[in-house]
Amino acid sequence: AQMHLTLVFLGDTPLAQLSAIGTMLDAAAAQKRFTLSIARPGCFPNCRRPRVLWAGLGGDVAACQALKTALDQGLAPLGWEPEKRPYSPHLTLGRARQNSRLPALDPAAVQLPPISWEVDQLHLYESKLGPAGPRYTIRHTARLAS
């Protein structure tokens, strides 16, 4: 269950701020639930030399963007600056291991299954990197309005 959609990456966060962040998540969750779907595949940094394979999202991407904006606005008074680059919602499907090379990928040749789901909750995750990859622990959950 490592699959998740990152809305905001906080980095190292003081424990003393977790309560305020949880309160902000609860306020942002006043937004109605929405549906997302898998749309198209892609690669970071590019598909000639991929390091990360991802799936772009379709469905109510505007609601996802509105939620991201609400989180950025709620985090600003707590000391977080919103990212400068535009938000591009995606699911990470896989990463190349350190020092490995993946062959070039033609995204048009990749068929992704037609999957959609209801976004009905937000989680504040703690992530710890280990030899087997990141390990995620939920620190707070906020349910979106129905």
Image: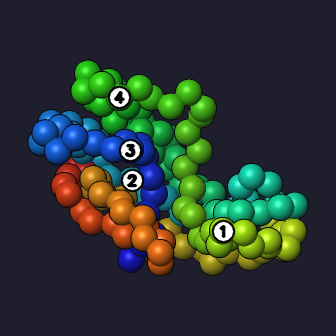
Q: How many marks?
A: 4
Q: CA distance from mark 2 to mark 1?
A: 36 Å
Along the viewing direction, whichever of 72 and 99 lies nearer the viewer: 99
Can you name the residue that lies furthest to the top here?
Answer: 77
Q: CA distance from mark 2 to mark 3?
A: 27 Å
Percent of width and height locating residue 31: 28, 42
Secondary structure category for the residue under label 2: strand
Q: Which residue is mark 4?
A: 80
Q: Residues within 10 Å of mark 4 (few under 14, many from 20)?
A: some
Q: Which residue is mark 1?
A: 98
Which amino acid is tagged 3? Gly
Q: Residues within 10 Å of mark 2 (few under 14, many from 20)?
A: some
Percent of width and height locating residue 68: 41, 39
> In the image, what residue occupies the spot 36% across and 63% down?
128
Secondary structure category for the residue under label 3: loop
Which amino acid is tagged 4? Trp
- Mark 2 or 3 closer to N-term? 3
Q: CA distance from mark 3 to mark 4?
A: 10 Å
Which amino acid is tagged 1? Gln
